Image (spheres, helix red, strand yellow):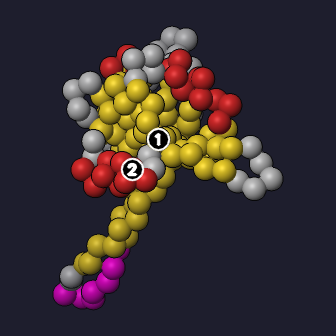
């Protein structure tokens, strides 16, 4: 499948949400006797949800969590004028407590049933109000 460098997809594994690729750029200062300057470092992050697992590739590291081990899915609902309601898939938490930001944005609300089917043991929570703020603050 396209966009992943380390992860090999299993026979018959299908992507349900994603893949999403983001880049983070940071500046590095270089001190040399001949001249000073700045260099930028760009790291790429790829996330997708398949019918079997959540996959996060960041640089040379990979996190995969089987969908059956996901206990909580955090979404953020949005509504756009003149279009269908959408939601962002913010994060997932595994039964061992590992929280992974997935940040897959602008999913049509009609696909919520696919989300529920992908994570059969998960509680789908909306990230809003005071609960959403506390969730962001403490990562629960």
Neighbours of disc 2 within 10 Å: few (<14), some (14-19), many (20+) = some
Instruction: Say which label, 2 or 1, has the lower sequence index.
Output: 1
Identify the element where label 2 is drawn.
helix
The percent coordinates of residue 65 (x first, y second) are 34, 25
Q: Which residue is mark 2?
A: 132
Q: Which residue is mark 1?
A: 126
Q: Over which residues does the magenta segment extend?
A: 33-39
Q: Is residue 130 above or below residue 116?
A: below
The percent coordinates of residue 94 (x first, y second) are 30, 28
Horizontal arrangement in the rendering, residue 97 relative to residue 2 (left or right): left
Residue 112, visible in the rendered structure:
yes
User: Viewer-proximal residue, 87 or 69?
Assistant: 87
Q: Residue furthest top?
A: 11
- The numbered disc on residue 97 is none
Q: Is residue 140 above or below residue 36?
A: above
| Residue depicted at 19% across the width and 87% down the height | 33
The percent coordinates of residue 5 (x first, y second) are 44, 36
Identify the element where label 1 is drawn.
strand
- Real-space CA distance between mark 2 and mark 1, rounded to the nearest whole angstrom: 7 Å
The part of the image, by quadrant, that contains residue 102 is top left
């Amino acid at each position: 499948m396209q966009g992943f460098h380390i992860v090999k997809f299993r026979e018959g594994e299908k992507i349900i949400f994603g893949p999403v690729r983001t880049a983070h750029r940071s500046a590095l200062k270089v001190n040399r006797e001949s001249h000073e300057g700045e260099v930028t470092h760009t790291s790429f992050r790829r996330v997708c949800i398949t019918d079997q697992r959540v996959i996060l590739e960041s640089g040379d590291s990979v996190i995969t969590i089987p969908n059956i081990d996901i206990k909580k899915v955090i979404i953020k609902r949005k509504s756009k004028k003149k279009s269908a309601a959408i939601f962002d898939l913010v994060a997932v938490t595994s039964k061992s407590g590992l929280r992974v930001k997935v940040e897959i944005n602008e999913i049509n609300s009609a696909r919520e049933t696919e989300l529920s089917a992908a994570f059969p043991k998960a509680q789908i929570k909306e990230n809003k109000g005071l609960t959403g703020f506390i969730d962001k603050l403490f990562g629960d």
